[in-house]
Image (cartoon, grey):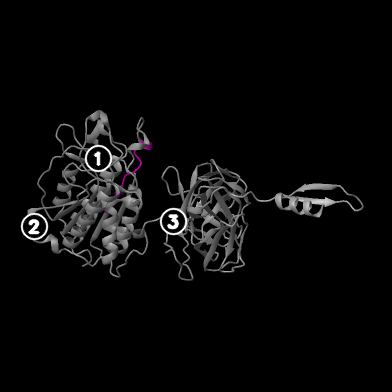
Amino acid sequence: MKVLLMTCLFIFPLTIFAQKQGSSSFKYVKTNKIPKPKAPPLLTISKLNFYDQKSGNGNSGLDAGENAEIIFTIKNEGRGSAYEVEIIIENNTKLKDIYFNNPPKIEELKAGESKQVNIQLTANDNIDNHDVEFQIKANEGNGFDLSPTLLNFKTFKFKSPLLEIVDYKFSTNDGGNHIKPTEIANLQFIIQNKGQGIANNIKINIINPEFIYEQENTSWIVKNLQPNQTYIINYGFFVNNKYKSPKIELKAIVSEEFGKWGCTKDMTVALDQVLSKTQSFNVEAKDYQDVAIEQFSLTADVDNNIPETHRKNPKRIGLIIGNEDYSSNQNGVNSEINVEFAVNDASIMKEYFIKTLGIQEDNLYFLKNATAAAMRSKINLVTERIKAMDSTAELFFYYAGHGFPDEITKAPYLIPVDVNATNITDGINLYDMYRKFSDAKPLKATIILDACFSGGGRNEGLLAARGVKVKPKHETITGNLVIMTATSESQTALPYKAKQHGIFTYYLLKKLQESKGDINYSELYNQVEFNVKNESLKVNEKLQNPQVLFSSEIANDWKNWKINE
């Protein structure tokens, strides 16, 4: 009997015999063993990738407070099945601020079969900058283990965003410079991320005082702002007659996902008072950071830091005209024909005339959105004042607006806001104006025109860009006149949207700013021509080539004229 029992145990190794105490019978119990392969498996890893999941980041590292994912494919390239495959992830760096879980066990991976494995990682908010090494290995139930694979990546300490309202300005929808009760006005402001972290889920809210009403929205949501990135809000509002405060104060509240890096700003303007062109608040970063934080503004660089001369010249006379709003002054004319930024061009040019050219304010005449009657009146007044100075006067004339030719004569005209292509001769004939100034015999006359003087058929009207494609007629210029124009031939005088100026005016002002007025006409024109020609191709994809015109009497002299002398 004993011999028989030993033989049975040898023949059936997976069976256990159990005997009840006091009994001669046996019970058979089957065990749960790992199947043995019929051929060897061969485990491999491929397509190993690391994905950081912070919105918009993409730095391929694990940031503080960020989730990430390790993704790879494990494949059995052998001829037999792999059983009970346990994938094990080890943090060789022993960094305690990273959390992850090992994936579930794979019961069987057949020959030629593959499986994608996803490992979720989370970084503690307090994590610092580190180089991290993870080891990935897999143990197979029958000992056909995977050779270890190393994955190296970086962790980064927390970088906070910092949202600020860096600039704002108030304006009126009709182009005027007063905010009045019952009229629609606009607040425009820039939000900038001045931190080094991404700001996510940004919420902007405007709080109105009593008796101030929004035109449309009072709240906005912005998905994210990268470091140094900006977002512009335009907010329309109006005030009823019960509003008694002498000033309007609107509060903007800006928040982000953490609730810690937003801002609140009160933006104020006087009611029924002349508006300043902008109110700027700029805060520089305290420490050197990875991303260069720029200074953004709703005004161009040439609108600020205008150089000032200490010497006023009582012999200088100035006339500035900015015609932008044609649609409000003509029935049936739509807003597309308005001359973008012409009023801003003229307004900033006025400051340069006073501060840089030294023209006294009582010698300077300024027209905004001028009618034909207003333009003629001021041109005649300036002409008479030049005559009264007995050839000692210096004239500076600036115009931004539409130019247009007579359909038959091709004579170029300056276009007042109440004149269109159907009554072109009611405008200001350009060469008649030149002759008028020349006959007054000024010592010098400088005429600057940010307009072009070409046009189409009478029924086509004025175009949104400053002109159309027909070559205007030219006449002889006499007297001590130098004329700098924005274009040559049949080109178009274009805007520079990023600077909110005509591109010709912007580079003229830029050179006056850089030189502080200490420059002769030849240098001024050459620099403006070079910059306009190149930048117009870059920003507008069209050639704009300024030109200078002058009479034969001063052909050898005008280049040496100085802005300040």
Mark 1 falls on what kind of element?
loop
Residue at the extreme top of the image, as rendered: 459
Disc 1: which residue: 467
The first of marks 3 and 2 along the sequence is 3
Badge 1 density bin: few <14, some 14–19, many ≥20, Cα 10 Å? many
Q: In which quarter of the image is residue 314?
A: bottom left
Residue 105 against residue 461 in the figure, above or below: below
Q: Give, as a three-letter code, the residue at label 2.
A: Ala
Q: Mark 2 points at which residue?
A: 555
Q: Please report whichever mark, 2 or 1, sits nearer to the chain's N-terminal start.
A: 1
The residue tagged with tag 2: helix, strand or loop? loop
Find disc 3 in the rendering and name its residue.
276
- Residue 262 in the image, given as x and y percentages of width and height: 57, 58
Q: Which amino acid does label 1 sit on?
A: Gly
Asked whether residue 320 is drawn in magenta, I would say yes
Residue sitting at x 24%, y 56%: 531
